[in-house]
Image (spheres, rainbow, N blue to C red):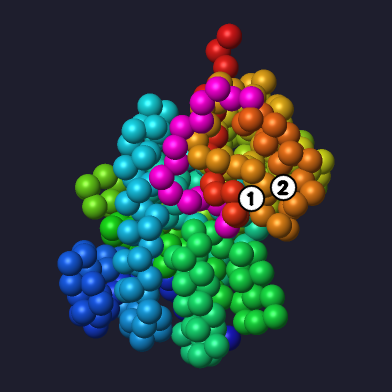
């Protein structure tokens, strides 16, 4: 049986630092582009233990190429557009419910943020190296390959349906590695009864991870991933998760690829928190229903939307959004895809709280 120190290191040994082999591969694949960034990731335990693991590029030989492709297709146009259209939000804190392992989208859209809070239902556990199997490494690489091509994660991939489950904490680290950021420290987080997340102490079950990151421009960034149930059963009034989410509503809310959950009755508690408290919301068609959204926020629309993803073809909220967009005198261009893959393209709605 592992002692507490060894168990702690095994659970969150999430390091992703691309060695010379990855850099050489990147240069060989795309000599005119930047090499894959080196994400130096360390694990900090409460007792001062500091470990660093260099992940061999052999675990995902295709990562250098897919990272280069992702930056060209998604990161570059997102960053240029966001500088023109989202900088006015002055988003220092961004809250991203239903995020899955997608850190990179929030980093692309909000360059001025110094705190990202991702909330989803996946446990960020990390297997000890001795327990890894080739199928798991392959699954992680396949999951990131799909994300790099499509810009979103599939829940079935994250949960290992009909396959092995990828290590969620490793996917978080891969997502950071799609950026130019350097990870300097990782800590466990525990969600306490008062709704606050704090670095975990011995004996307390961790609920998430905190990444201390430095962006390529030198700005410090704290990335918190917190696992919690965002449905009404998880956000009962007075519950620690409800108090936690209520306290996060001082930040800009990002909603993307959220499976239309906020449009369903059993996620009404979170929808009400966002509508009542968030200063701004940036969302695709899967976020808040357009009716409560337009009543509380002044909305600028970008892109196009004619039909939801086939999985939600019968979405009543989707039909309301189509009618809303048809009535708008002008919809601004969106020079990149975001959200679920659809024939109709992508839409982003940028809402700032109505002050009238």
Asked if disc 2 and disc 1 are in contact, CB closer than 8 Å, the reply is: yes
Using the image as rendered, state which of residue 61 and residue 54 is in the foreground. 61
Q: Which residue is labeled 1 in the image? A: 258
Using the image as rendered, state which of residue 355 and residue 317 is in the foreground. 317
Instruction: Provide the secondary structure element on which disc 1 rests.
Output: loop
Give the answer, above or below, for where 340 lies relative to 177: above
| Left or right position of 40 against 324 | left
Q: On the image, which quarter does residue 208 sit in?
A: bottom right
Using the image as rendered, state which of residue 120 and residue 224 is in the foreground. 120
Instruction: Provide the secondary structure element on which disc 2 rests.
Output: helix
Residue 8 visible? The answer is no
Residue 313 visible? The answer is yes
**Residue 37 within the magenta-colored segment of the rendering:** no
- The residue carrying pointer 1 sits among few (fewer than 14), some (14 to 19) or many (20 or more) residues within 10 Å by Cα, namely many
Q: Which residue is labeled 2 in the image? A: 261
Q: On the image, which quarter does residue 103 sit in?
A: bottom left
Look at 28% across and 51% down and name the residue there.
215
| Left or right position of 107 against 280 | left
Look at 22% across and 48% down and name the residue there.
218
Give the answer, above or below, for where 181 lies relative to 4: above
Give the Cα distance between marks 2 and 1.
6 Å
Give the answer, above or below, for where 186 lies relative to 335: below
Region rendered in magenta:
327-341
Rendered location of residue 268, percent (x, y): 76, 38
């Amino acid at each position: 049986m592992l002692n507490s120190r060894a168990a702690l290191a095994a659970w969150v040994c999430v390091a992703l630092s691309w060695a010379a082999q990855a850099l050489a591969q990147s240069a060989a694949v795309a000599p005119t582009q930047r090499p894959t960034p080196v994400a130096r990731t360390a694990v900090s335990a409460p007792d001062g233990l500091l470990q660093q693991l260099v992940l061999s590029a052999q675990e995902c030989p295709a990562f250098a190429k897919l990272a280069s492709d992702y930056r060209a297709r998604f990161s570059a146009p997102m960053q240029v557009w966001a500088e023109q259209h989202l900088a006015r939000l002055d988003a220092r804190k961004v809250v991203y419910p239903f995020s899955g392992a997608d850190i990179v989208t929030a980093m692309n859209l909000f360059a001025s943020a110094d705190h990202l809070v991702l909330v989803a239902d996946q446990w960020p556990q990390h297997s000890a190296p001795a327990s890894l199997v080739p199928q798991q490494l392959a699954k992680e690489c396949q999951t990131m390959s799909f994300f790099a091509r499509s810009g979103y994660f599939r829940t079935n991939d994250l949960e290992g349906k009909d396959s092995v489950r990828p290590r969620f904490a490793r996917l978080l680290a891969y997502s950071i590695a799609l950026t130019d950021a350097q990870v300097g420290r990782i800590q466990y987080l525990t969600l306490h009864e008062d709704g606050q997340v704090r670095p975990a102490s011995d004996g307390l079950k961790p609920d998430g991870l905190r990444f201390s990151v430095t962006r390529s421009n030198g700005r410090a960034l704290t990335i918190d991933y917190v696992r919690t149930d965002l449905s009404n059963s998880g956000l009962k009034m007075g519950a620690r998760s409800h108090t936690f989410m209520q306290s996060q509503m001082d930040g800009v809310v990002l909603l993307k690829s959220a499976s239309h959950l906020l449009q369903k009755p059993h996620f009404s508690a979170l929808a009400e928190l966002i509508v009542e408290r968030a200063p701004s919301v940036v969302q695709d068609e899967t976020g808040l229903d357009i009716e409560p959204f337009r009543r509380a926020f002044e909305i600028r629309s970008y892109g196009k939307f004619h039909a939801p993803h086939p999985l939600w073809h019968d979405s009543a909220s989707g039909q309301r959004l189509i009618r809303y967009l048809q009535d708008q005198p002008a919809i601004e261009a969106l020079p990149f895809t975001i959200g679920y893959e659809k024939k109709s393209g992508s839409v982003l709605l940028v809402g700032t709280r109505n002050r009238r």
